[in-house]
Amino acid sequence: MQFSRTSIDDVIICQPKIFADSRGYFLETFKQEHFESFLGFSVGFCQDNESQSNKGVLRGLHYQCGPYAQSKLVRVIKGSALDVVVDIRRGSPTFGKHIAIELSAENKTQLFVPRGFAHGFLVLEDETIFSYKVDSYYSPQHDRGILFSDPVLSIDWGLPESELILSDKDNKNPLLKDAIDLFDYSINYYFQ
């Protein structure tokens, strides 16, 4: 597995080494000791999640606050998606900035989304399967969101808004300036 930092330092691209031959391929999707050695801290993933969506579905931008803040290791195992991560750590030099990367079954790229970031993705192909590990359980009381179309974020989703398929909840998320329970850049959420 090769790791590289994005333009937002704490968001990490994870590129597995693929061993392919006439039979197919093999790869390691996660190896804790290598992952944590690169990060420099421990992430205790406790649950794996999976969703299936069709082209045009946009899920996000989501995060959990407080003691249920989550890190995620995300990947696509079938199809493709545009994955977007937004820095929501007040005081961060990259507060309100985002990165966008295509994850697909073909490129097998994974993205580490640390605590302190909102996350969302737009499905680019029908029957796309999105898979991710989390290091904290889902808590409805700590579930938060930011509006995907907030003009301050300037996210180019690559499709006209009229073609996006969103849940009612995601359509009603607040703008970043109105979002509650954001994170503080000066707090290390892994050593509390």
Image (cartoon, rainbow, N blue to C red):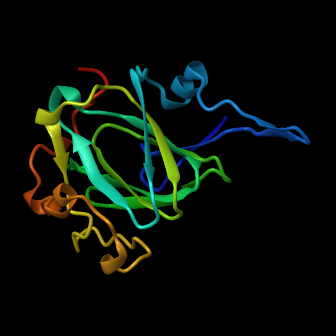
Residue 93 appearing in the image: no
Q: Residue at x 63, y 50 (%)?
A: 105
Q: Is residue 18 above or below residue 91?
A: above
- Residue 153: horizontal and vertical position, in percent? 27, 67
Residue 32, quarter of picture? top right
Q: Is residue 187 above or below residue 159?
A: above
Q: Residue at x 60, y 47 (%)?
A: 109
Along the horizontal axis of the image, is 83 left or right of 22? left
Q: How many labels sit on residues? A: 0
Q: Is residue 186 above or below residue 97?
A: above
Give the camera-side residue of 37 and 55: 55
Quadrant housing the N terminus: top right
Residue 151 appearing in the image: yes
Quadrant housing the C terminus: top left
- Residue 138: horizontal and vertical position, in percent? 25, 30
- Residue 174: horizontal and vertical position, in percent? 12, 60
Q: Residue at x 28, y 62 (%)?
A: 166
Along the horizontal axis of the image, is 67 left or right of 79? left
Q: Can you name the residue that lies furthest to the right here?
A: 22
Q: Residue at x 31, y 79 (%)?
A: 162
Residue 113, quarter of picture? top left
Along the horizontal axis of the image, is 85 left or right of 139? right
Residue 172, quarter of picture? bottom left
Give the camera-side residue of 130 and 73: 130
